Image (tube, rainbow, N blue to C red):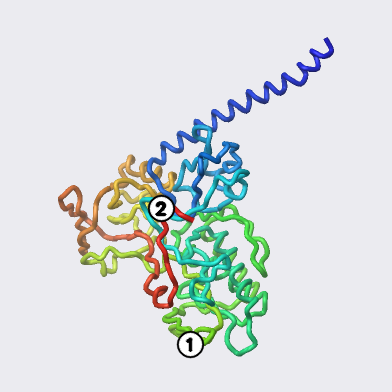
Amino acid sequence: MDTLATYLIYAVPCLLLLVWHVRRRRRLERVSVKAQEATGSAEPASLHPIIDPARCIGCGACVKACPEQVHHTVLGIVGGRAALVSPGDCIGHGACKTVCPVEAITLVFGSERRGVDIPILTPTFESTVPGIFIAGELGGMGLIRNALEQGRQAVEAIAARRSGDERLDLLVVGAGPAGFAAALTAKSKGMRCVTVEQESLGGAVFQYPRGKLVMTAPATVPLIGTINFRQTSKEALLRFWQEAEKKTGVQINYKERVEDVTRTGDGFTVKTSRATYQTRSVLLAIGRRGTPRKLGVPGEELSKVVYRLIDPEQYSGKHVLVVGGGDSALEAAASIAESGSDAVVLSYRGEEFDRAKARNRERIKAAASAGRLQVLMKSSVRQIATESVAIERDGGTLKVRNDAVIVSAGGVLPSDFLRRVGITVETKYGVA
């Protein structure tokens, strides 16, 4: 009897634990399948995981490790195996690969349908041109934390090569997250460094719409310490960086644009809109959005055409056309519609918003259902006039009343510049 009691004492809790685990697992699978169905054919916009079902044991470690999982169902369990169920919400943390106990996860760029142009880099972020380094979004990493870390790591590698001549040790191009972290790292190491930025501190973050939520994760930056933001607004993050700029005394030359980079001996001559620099190394932290992709249609030169949204309220009461199918386009259209305007048109050449995050697609759906937004899929802008826009759709041309056009068709990789400098770029279709 004592033996039976002992068995029951241990067996009952184990049975209860097993039942709880099975129910929890089934609930996770239901949530995962629902998220997968909701995303349809959505594709990831940046670095993302590919999971080998033959290796995956379905332990769920990757699901727990994903920092975005608190807010989005990015990874899930489907059919007993891990799966990327919401590709549009994946922003390339890479934590899933790190924790996988059976090495079933590979981090890749692009997909079979859509390639991504990526400069070829070494583990220290050096390009195919010795002495020229690339960090941040230009290298394919869109995550703020990754950009900060890459800027720091690249400069640490450059610092080991310093020479004793009068040249600069480093010229940093761009003051976004990667460039700012690079400038701070160079200052902390006493390097002879110049940082130039053609616009303002923050890079792509500065160009986000007013009030946009920026997601990041902890990163360590010299002279500042740990930047421990998880969720914050664009304005709060920029204020933090501006205060850090003042506190550390790091120097950044604003409104200075790089015009040419040429090899000079074992270094480079960098010509900008203001000066000419001799430097041993160059770090390109210019992002991929600096040059917006244009439509190439008559009337695009009109002053009412812009390529980023700053304040949705400035379009109140106006007839606005937003062009594009990515997150920036959907955010712009939804923000303007939500601000009170009921004359917003969103035009996209594709059949569905397969590269946008689920929350942005839901905002568009809600605005359209409320009658505040008209969505024109499989459409293309053909001409922009002073008071109207001609849009081709279903074999015909639709003339829409218009006061303002916002083109959010992404940025153009500065391929000509990279090619002129000698940097090799390759197009990746779902490969590492």
- Percent from the top left, x then y, of residue 111? 41, 51
- Percent from the top left, x then y, of residue 19? 63, 23
Q: Residues within 10 Å of mark 1 (few under 14, many from 20)?
A: some
Instruction: Give 103 or 386, whichever is nearer the viewer.
Output: 103
Which quadrant of the view contains residue 245?
bottom right
**Is any atom of residue 268 visible in this view?**
yes
Numbered disc 1: secondary structure? strand
Residue on which the image places disc 2: 327
Disc 1 marks a residue whose amino acid type is Thr
Lateral position of residue 303 relative to residue 50, left or right: left
Lateral position of residue 139 relative to residue 58, left or right: left
Whole-angstrom CA distance, mark 1 to mark 2, is: 38 Å
- Percent from the top left, x then y, of residue 412? 37, 66
Q: Residues within 10 Å of mark 2 (few under 14, many from 20)?
A: many
What residue is at 62 percent from the left and 89 percent from the top?
165
Residue on which the image places disc 1: 276
Instruction: Give 91 or 3, whichever is nearer the viewer.
Output: 3
Residue occupying the far bottom of the picture:
166
